[in-house]
Every structure is written in C-alpha cells, then in structure tokens.
Image: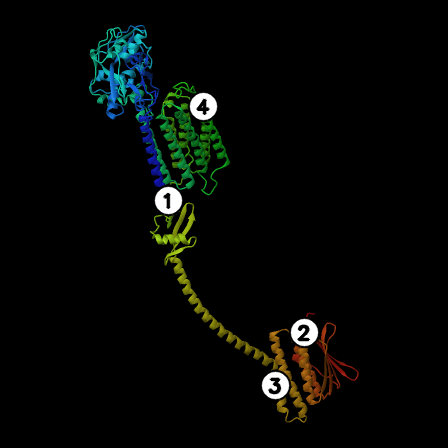
Amino acid sequence: MKKGEAKLICRIMVWAIIATLFFSLVSCSGNNKRENSVNNNIIYTLDEPAFYADVISEILPLYRLEKEEDGNSIFSYINKGYAAEAFDVQALGALESGVASQWYPQYLATVVIAIDRGLTDVEISGWRDLLTAEEDVAVSDAQPHLQLIMSAISYALEGENFSLDSAANLLRELRHKERLLLNTFTAPIIICFDYQAAALIRSGQQLEILVPLEGTLTYEKGILSNEELTFRGDEERALLSAGFVLRNGSFDSKYYPQANYVSAHQLEDYSHLSKVSQNVVKVFRRNVLRTRLYSSADNREHQLLPLLYIIFVVVWLASIISRAMRQRLKRILFLIGIVLLGWIIVRLVKYQMPSNILNRYLWYGYYFFQMALPILLLWLVWRSDKMDDQPASNKALTAVTLWNAVLVAFVQTNDLHNLVFRFDLSNPSYAEDYSYGPVFYIITLSWIAELIAAIGMLLVKSSRLPRKRAFIFPLLFCLIMLVYSVGYTSRVPVFWDSDYTTVVGILSLMFLEISMQSCLVQVNNKYSGLFTHSPLNMQILNSEGKLVLASANAPQLDLELQQAALAAYPEAVRADKDTLLFSKKIVGGYAQWQEDISHLNFLHQQLEESMKKLELTHAVLEEEEKIQQELDEESAKLQVMTELEEVIAADLLRLSSMIESLPDSDQESRESGRIALLLCFVKRSSNLFFRKQETKLLSASELSAYVAELAEIAQYFGMKILVNSEIKEEIPVLQARSLYEFTYSVVDRAAQAENPHLLLHLLTEKDQIVLRFIASEDLRSFEPEIDLQAEISSAGGSFACKDLDGAVGISLAFPRAGE
C-alpha cells in the first residue's frame, strides 16, 4: 500500500473512532450546559405524577413534578440543573460519579404482584404461581423499572448471587403462553411496585397487593439533585396519605390490605445488582420477547456495533486500496466506504439525541447516503471494464444522480408536505408512530430499480467472462438485500427489529467483495502478484518517484540512478556497460525497466570484427580486381592489336614489298608517292579500326578529311584529285571504312595507270550514300580486292564501273543509316 494512502486510512479510522466515542459520551451527558433558567424548579419523574405531585406541592411548594420525556434519562435533567425522582440504585451511582451531590430518600418501593379482584379470583402466593394461573400478566419494560423488577424476581428465585436467568425464563414462559402483556395496568395480574398498585387502588381498581412468598426486593426512592432542598410540613404524613410506604416500613393499611412484607429484602450493596442488571434490556428483548436476535439490543450494543462496523469498513477500505490497481475504481470504492461510514455516524449521532428537530433532520439525513449508495454501485459496475483514460461517467448515470437528488430534496423538505413520512409532530413518539407517503415508495422503488440495474449490468458483463457462473453469489446477496429492504419497509418483525443502516452496509460490502473476488468488478487485485512473479525486469514508481511495485527480477537501483532515469525520460540512461535503464510515464507515476544489451554489444563487436574482415577482403578484392583489370586491359590490348594486325597485315606486307622494290623502280618518285599513300591509308585504317571499337558512327566531315588527305598525298606523284562532299550526316563506321578503303584502292589504281586527273564526289542519292570517281584515263579494268568486296557486300553496298563517253565512272553505294 502506498504510504500516503495508508496515512489516509489511519486518519479515517482514528476520526471515525473519535466520532463514535464522542457521541457515545454525548449520549451519557446529553447537553452538559447547565441551564440556569427560571424553570429549574422542576422535578422530573418517570412515573405518572398523579399522587406524588400532591406530596411535592405540600413538602416542596416551590417545585412542580413533571414526567420526563422519552429518550431522556434522569441524569440529563440533573446535568441541566433540574432535580429528578430516582431509585437508590441510580442515586448511589450518581453520587459516586459526581453527577449529583444531594440525595433525599423518601419512601420504599417494593416489587409486588398486584391482582385485580374485579377481573380474577385466582389464588397466587408467589412468582412460580404465575405460570399455573390462567390469567394475563402485565409488566412494564420501561427503564429502570424492568431492571429492578427482573432483579427482584431473580433474587427471590436464585438468592443473593442471582442472575437474570430465572426472571427471563419466567417471563419467557408467560410470553410463550401468550399471557405476557407490556406497559398496561388493566391486566388481571400486574408485576409492579407497591406504590404503583396503591395509586391504582386510590383510582378505584380492586387490587390485592401480594408480596411473593419466595421473596422480593425493596428499593428506596427519593429526589436526586445538585442543589440542597428544603422540605416543609409533615413529610411522612403527606407520603402516607398519598399511599406510599415510609422508609421505616409504615404504610396506610387501607391501601395495602393483607400486605405482608416479611419476605421483602433490601440490599445493602447494589454492586452485584448493578453488574447483573446492566444487560437487562438485552436479556429481556432476546430471551423473553425473542426480538433483536441479530441486531443490537441495548444502548451498549447500539454504541459498540457502530464502532465495530466502522472498524470493519475502515479495514475493508484499507484492504481495497492495497488490492485495487486501477485508480478510478479505487476512488469509487473509497467513496462507497465514505458513504457507509457517514451513514453509520449520522445514525449514531441520531440515536444519542433526544427527539427534537435536529434528531428528525439527522433521520432525514440517512437518505443522502442511502440514495448515494446505489449511484456509486452503478458507477462502479459501469466503470469495472473500462480503462482510466476513458470518460469517467455517462449521461444515464448523470440523469439517475439528478433524479436521486430530487428525491433526497423531497425527504429534506418532508416537514412541509409529509409526502415521504406521515406523522404528527405534536405526538412525542412520532419517531416510532408514523406511516409512509407516496414519495417514500417512489424512493424505495428507485433504490431497488437502481440496484436491479447494477445486477443486470453485472449479468451482461459476466456473460463475457470465462467463469460463466461468477454472478451467482453476487446475485444471491443482491436478492437478500432486496428481500431485506422490502421486509423492513413492510415492517416484518424479523427485519424491522434489525438495524437497517448496519445490515445494508454489511450486505453492500459483501456484495462488493464477492463481485471483486469473482472478477465481475475487475479491480485487478491479482496484478500485484502477477507483476511480482513475472520475469519482467521492471518496477513501478508513483508520481513522487517512490517504489510501489517491483518484479522478482527487478534490481536494487540507487536513488541517484533512478532519478536520473526519470529526468532523462523519454530517453534511456546507461546503468553499466551492458545495461540500459528506461523510464515511461504512466497514469499516476512511472514504469522503469532495465534491458540487457550485452548480446547487442556482443553482436556489435562481432559486426565490427566482421567489418574489419570485410574491409580486408574488400582491399584484397580491389587489388585482385585491379590486377584482373590490368590483365583484362592487357589482354584487350593484345586482342585489339591482334585484330589490327589482322586488318593491316596484308597492307603492311604490301608496304614492305613496295619499299624493298623501290630502289629497282624506274619511277621512284611515283612509287614513293604510292608508299606514302599506303602509309596514310594504313594509319587511317587503324584510326577507323579503333573508332569502330568506340562508336558506330563517324561524321561525314571526318571522312571527307581522310579522303582529302589522300588527295594531298597524290599530288606528290603528279595526280590531281578534286574532292567534293555533299554529305552532312554521320556515316556508320563500317561503311566509312569501306568507302575510305575503296577510295584508296581507286587512287592507287589510278596512280599505277598514270592517270593525271581524278574527280571524287561524295553525296547522298535516293536514300543511299554514294561515292563516285571519274578518271581521265581508262580504269574499266579496276576491280576491288576480294576482301574489300566482301566488306562492301556485308555492309550492303554495291560497286559499279561505267563508260561515260571518253571517261570512266566508278561508284560505290551504301544504304543510308537507318534505311
């Protein structure tokens, strides 16, 4: 559990216990402010003040006797400055505790059996005869009368060390026979005090006062006060004439005919009686009336039960806060706990106060909590399968809340319209004597409908869970709550006698707990264990940076590193060489986890080594490639040179032959020109060979330049060649080489024939590239060499030689590129 939440739970528990103890003390002291008003000359009594009032008016003329109000004890009047009539059992305790300072005992009060001879002639001698007499027996359940009467019966039947069992058994048997009546003086047999029987005789009833043969107890009764009282007149005479028994045992025989007080005893020490009789209300209700079997039965239990209930709710709240993981659900459950605590505290305050307007509005205040509880249950069920980042509520819940607020407003204004509770405020017992108005039934139906809606939502949600029967126990407790609510509203005794606030609260807590245990309300209470035992290397911190949850493998981090990780969010920090610490903000705090990067570091190291090996390999390959490239280049050069040699081998051989035969030639000048012409041809043929390796096309201007070069060389041996080129486009290298070689062949043949003039025309004609020669001498015998003819034929060319009327025309034609 978070430290802050633990402190909050402790504060709630401490204040709840303080409130419980405070209001418990208030119940004993009432309003401790002494009222020094002009009306403090009143003596309050529990009995009807009929004849004792005459005595007071005579012996204390400045005082008047009034009956105490329901819910107020004599001690509350003493604290307010009034005097009160009391039994010696009460007076001695008040004197010892300092509640009162003056005690004036006046007469004896003996527990007797009064038999109305006007109604029955049954013969009775003692307590046991009441069981055999077939007559109704009346007894008062008002305090302290019941306490003293049952103590007297038990003393008579058991002796000095008595308990209340004998009296309880006697009265229970009468109750079982349906012969026990409560709070009436009209029954044939009455168990009462002798002064009460004397008052009834004075009123005209034909009573016989019987002191039981087994024995009984006599008490003293007088006035208890904090002020000194001054009595006037003959006190004993006034008491005797009013029908009271004096402290010395004297009485007026006309009120006590045949009364024999021999078996009556007066205790000297009331400590045992006080100890035994403090549980008389509880014993009478449970053992005699068989009521309050499952709820608080007396004031001590009324105060102890809320204290135990508060402790139970606070412990449950602490458990929920420690178990629930989701913040929204935790807040709703916390509000439910606060509502239950507020309800029981208001109930506690209400029962410690007299019946007045504040008490009534505390009663109305119940409905703040009663109508808030189903809203919170609905909200809880609706939120149970939703994440914290989803909307907190919806329109339906808001509408239901407003509706409940309207109903609560009706309750708070009930005094104006009586539509919720119907009672008469002039009736002192209106808090018990009331009926329900129409709005009350609307409130009950709304409360039940909202509870049914919550059950329906749970049933729908349970259909989506693996445990299909998970809804059975929560549904059972809801049905119990519905049955109880209807039974309490209908005032069925077993339900009406219980404490509505406590029962509804406990049933609500059981419903919630079972719903959570069955996973219908998903508080994720198993997440802590799951997280702790998970293999995750993670821990959860709150918004203050304090540890909340940690997995089993989570390491112990020093505070500095932990804070550094939070400050570096969303980046990671390095815990060590092989570990990274990450932080991520989540709702209410942070998640921190470590990641082992040793394998990544190992891979990185391997990659670095592999990169080095690859670099070395790459260097070797580059060297190999360089060497291979050099070898390939050399091989290519050799191949090219080989091919070139193959191309010019015949020309070189012919050149060598021409050079060798030059000295023997009689036309040395012409032969030298032919040698120069052949050398130029070989050179340009080589150029065209290399150009063919580089590109497929040759510009017409470059070809024209090569041809013009041949024409210039021809001038050295007396031949004039006129070159005319009309071609502007590029020519395939293969065709250009054939045209160039063909030009050389024609010029060389013309040189051999001593042809002084030659016209050369290079043009395009009808999608052809045409090379034409016109010689001044007869060259009709010219034929290209076989290799040249093969090249011309492979390039798609055609050769022609024509007679042109005194001249010879030689032509070579190739189709134009792309044709």
Q: CA distance from mark 1 to mark 4?
A: 56 Å
- The Cα–Cα distance between marks 4 and 2, rounded to whole angstroms, is 119 Å
- Counting from the top left corner in percent of width and height, residue 546 is at 36, 47
Look at the picture and state if 448 lies above or below 807.
above
Choose mark 2 or mark 3, whichever is in front: 2
Gap in Å between the C-alphas at discs 3 and 1?
100 Å
Q: CA distance from mark 4 to mark 3?
A: 143 Å
Nearer to us: label 4 or label 2: 4
Q: Return the residue at label 4.
A: 415
Q: Secondary structure at mark 1?
A: helix
Task: Check disc 3 and report the residue beneath it.
Answer: 653
Snapshot quadrant of residue 408: top left
- Residue at point 42%, 29% (across, down): 370
Lower position in the chain sequence, tag 3 or tag 1: 1
In this view of the protein, which residue sits in the foreground, 234 or 27?
A: 234
Q: Position of residue 518 (x, y in %)?
A: 39, 36
Which numbered disc, 1 or 4, marks the residue that appears first in the sequence?
A: 4
> Is residue 440 something one can see in this rendering?
no
Where's the N terminus, which quadrant? top left
What amino acid is labelled 3 in the image? Answer: Leu
Count neighbours of disc 2 (C-alpha within 10 A) and say few if under 14, some if 14 to 19, many if 20 or more. Answer: some
- Decide: is 21 above or below 153: below
Circle 3 SS class:
helix
Q: Where does label 1 land, which residue?
A: 530
Q: Residue at x 41, y 45 (%)?
A: 588
Give whichever of discs 2 and 3 has the lower sequence position. Answer: 3
Q: Nearer the viewer, mark 4 or mark 3?
A: 4
Give yes or no for contact between labels 2 and 3 (Cβ–Cβ under 8 Å): no
User: In percent of the image, x 48 and y 40: which residue is there?
Assistant: 391
